[in-house]
Image: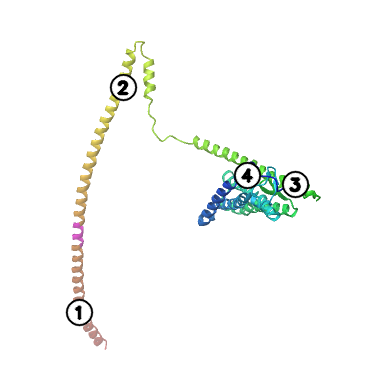
Amino acid sequence: MSTEDAGHDVKSIIIAIVPKFPALVSILGSSAIIRKVYKSPTKRKNIYHRILCGLSCSDILASSCYFLGTWLVPAKKVGGFGLVFGASGNNATCSLSGFLTQFAICSPLYNGTLSWYYLLSIYFNWSERKIRKIEKYFHIIPIGYALISSSIALGLDMYGNVEWLCWIKPDIAEGEEPSNAQMNFAVFQWVFLFGPVWATIAFVTTVMFVLYRKMRENEKKMEKYQFATKRTRPDIDLIKKNLESEGSPDGNKNEDNWGTFRGSSMKNSSSITSDDGKALRTSSLKIKSSGTSQGDGWKKLRKSSKRDDEGWKKLRQSGATAKVSLRDVDVEAQSSDVPTTRTSQSDGWKKLR
């Protein structure tokens, strides 16, 4: 029904204007997330950021519908607070608003998908490679359910004005008989939106609780195997209190005990430090003396190596001279033996003949 005489109620004005501001902020924030993921090659390859990008895209569509608000509602439409403020659309724009409003179910379903990712990666310790095999379902389920439910409601002519938006609440004209689906539009509201949203809230809450328990158990295990790295120091106040408790009522013995304890501790510290200092000095002297002796040894070793080199040179020279002398002896022997053998051979032939 519509009327021209009804005025705008204050509640109608507030409900038409206020949602535009958070919707605009949501659009800007989601756009920034998409831009950040798109510009980073590393984040584009990451499953978490791709799910976050899908969530941001669905949020932009829903926030755009909330920002347009009553502008898509048919003009001169009367709602629960009187004449709808800012209504300037028609039945077609109302159907568009209803379709986008129902498609907004994609956002909470993407939140459930993100919880599934946390559960698989943290609780079940799935690797990115294993999760990537089922990643397509993280996008198919929310987008597919939103698209199918929106299309069914549009096909059954279920969209109508709901205060500052259009959604599943058909406008039945006077004298027009509603269909069975239109008469049971409340069932479609629960099946298409209210039911999935509450189921997602329960699922996300359960997952967060399970992950909290898991992380808490891991922290307890880590605390169980932690070891102190700093050296513990005696509690001086506790020792003083124990010494005082052993003293007399007048307190003289208390002071004597505490003084004896401090004196013994100072003596122990002084004796330890003096002994350590003597040992340190003697060890340093030994190191210096051993260093000096090692230096002398290296000098002697270098001198002996030089002597060895000179001996090797002399040995090579003597070997060369020996080879030359032997070569001369062989030549002389060969020159003296050849003619004698030839003479003896000729004499023998003569005797044979």
Q: 311 or 182, which is in the foreground?
A: 182
Reading the image, the residue beneath label 1 is: 335
Q: 137 or 180, which is in the foreground?
A: 180
Residue 31 colored in magenta in the image: no
Q: Is residue 190 above or below residue 132?
A: above
How far across and down, in percent of the image, does residue 229 sit? 41, 36
Identify the element where label 4 is drawn.
Answer: helix
Residue at image position (21%, 48%) is 295
Q: Which is closer to the viewer, label 1 or label 2?
A: 2
Identify the element where label 2 is drawn.
Answer: helix
Residue 314 falls left or right of residue 271:
left
Q: Is residue 57 above or below residue 248?
A: below
Residue 308 colored in magenta in the image: yes
Disc assigned to residue 24: none
Q: Which is closer to the viewer, label 4 or label 3?
A: 4
Q: CA distance from mark 1 to mark 2?
A: 108 Å
Q: CA distance from mark 4 to mark 1?
A: 140 Å
Can see residue 130? Answer: no
Disc assigned to residue 262: 2
How far across and down, in percent of the image, does residue 142 sit? 65, 51
Residue 30 falls left or right of residue 261:
right
How far across and down, in percent of the image, does residue 81 sit? 68, 42
Can see residue 295? Answer: yes
Question: Which badge, 4 or 1, comes first in the chain's sequence?
Answer: 4
